[in-house]
Structure formats: C-alpha cells, structure tokens
Amino acid sequence: MFKVYVDSDSLPERQRALLLKRLVRDCIPALFAADRPLKDVSSAIACHTAALRAPMRGLADVEELRRIRSPLELVVVEKGNDSADDYLVSAAEPGGLCITHDIPLAARMVGKGLVVIDDRGNVYDRSNIAERLGMRNFMKDMRENGFFEERQKRFTAKDVENFANALDRMIHRLSSNE
C-alpha cells in the first residue's frame, strides 16, 4: 500500500483534521513530521491504536496486542531550517503521496516519485512542479528586491473543500494503482 508523508508544520489544523479522519478510516499508513509535538496527531494515533486492539482484547495475549498499532506515525525532528523536510525526503518511497505547502519540498518529493497535494488542494507532479517552483522562486526574488510585499491569501471554506476533494481523488488513484 502507498504511504502518505505529511509536512505537519505547514498543514493547517482544519486540513490536518480532515486528513487524519480519512487516514484512520481507511487505515492508510502515514508519516507526520514536525519540529514540535502535535496533540491532534498523537491523539488520533492513540485512539486508532485502541480501536484496532479492541476486537482482540480477551482473544490475544499482551504481546500480540502490543504489536497491533495504528499505521500512523508522528516523528518530532530537531528544530531547524528544513529539518522536517529533510526527514520526509529521506523516508519517502516512490508511489506515495506527500502533503505540504512548501514548494521546494514538493519539488524534492516529486523528484523521488511522489504526488504532492498542497493545503489548498493543488496537485503537483512531474508535469507541473518545475513551472510552480520557478514561479515561487521568481516571486521570492521580487519580494526580496522590494517589488511586492509578502501576502498570503486567507483560507476559505472553498480551499478546505478543494483540499478534501484533491485528497479523495489522489487516494482513489493511488489505491487503484496497487
């Protein structure tokens, strides 16, 4: 089965909640990387593990129960520039899905053979990531030279809906390829 790699630092809580719900429901393996503990992810992992173990209580011994775990994992990396990104890239395997708002990370993950969704539902793959990275770098240069102020659009309900729809499409597509 494919795996989902999540740049948790760049994913807003509403989108993270949608993602966690879908991953738990379908029991999809995922790696969340962040430079701090995330209560919502830790809680989802604990609740999912308990739900997976519940039917086996009384039927399996303690050691067997301990081996039953959620396929979700949270890794807290040291604080630092791109530390979570570097961890995700080193752990990523081709054919997976990455969730990030970070375009340079998206480019690195696409280079490793993953499909990427950002927090607004945009999908990046080999066909479009070079153009998006080039535009990002151009706009960064323009801001650094004083031509534009850095402004990010506020999230809307439509952005969350677009993310959920893109997530559904990619999970269906990746599940069909197996």
Image (cartoon, rainbow, N blue to C red):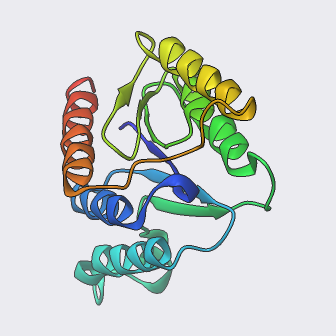
Front residue of this view, candidates 134 and 41: 134
Residue 23 in the image: above or below residue 40: above
Q: Residue at x 71, y 33 (%)?
A: 146
Task: Residue 144: name its quadrant.
Answer: top right
Quarter of the image where the C terminus is located: top left
Q: Is residue 27 left or right of residue 37?
A: left
Q: Residue at x 79, y 49 (%)?
A: 81
Q: Residue at x 28, y 78 (%)?
A: 51
Quarter of the image where the N terminus is located: top left
Residue 63 in the image: above or below residue 111: below
Can you give x and y, in whole percent of width and height, for residue 26 in the image?
23, 54
Front residue of this view, candidates 76 and 48: 76
Q: Residue at x 49, y 43 (%)?
A: 100
Can you give x and y, in whole percent of width and height, for residue 140 in the image?
65, 30
Q: Is residue 146 left or right of residue 156?
A: right
Looking at the rendered structure, the number of numbered marks drawn on it comes to: 0
Can you give x and y, in whole percent of width and height, for residue 6 in the image?
49, 49
Q: Residue furthest top?
A: 127
Task: Residue 74: name its quadrant.
Answer: bottom right
Q: Is residue 15 left or right of residue 143?
A: left
Q: Residue furthest front?
A: 147
Q: Is residue 109 left or right of residue 157?
A: right
Residue 103 in the image: above or below residue 161: above
Front residue of this view, candidates 140 and 104: 140
Can you give x and y, in whole percent of width and height, for residue 14 in the image?
33, 65
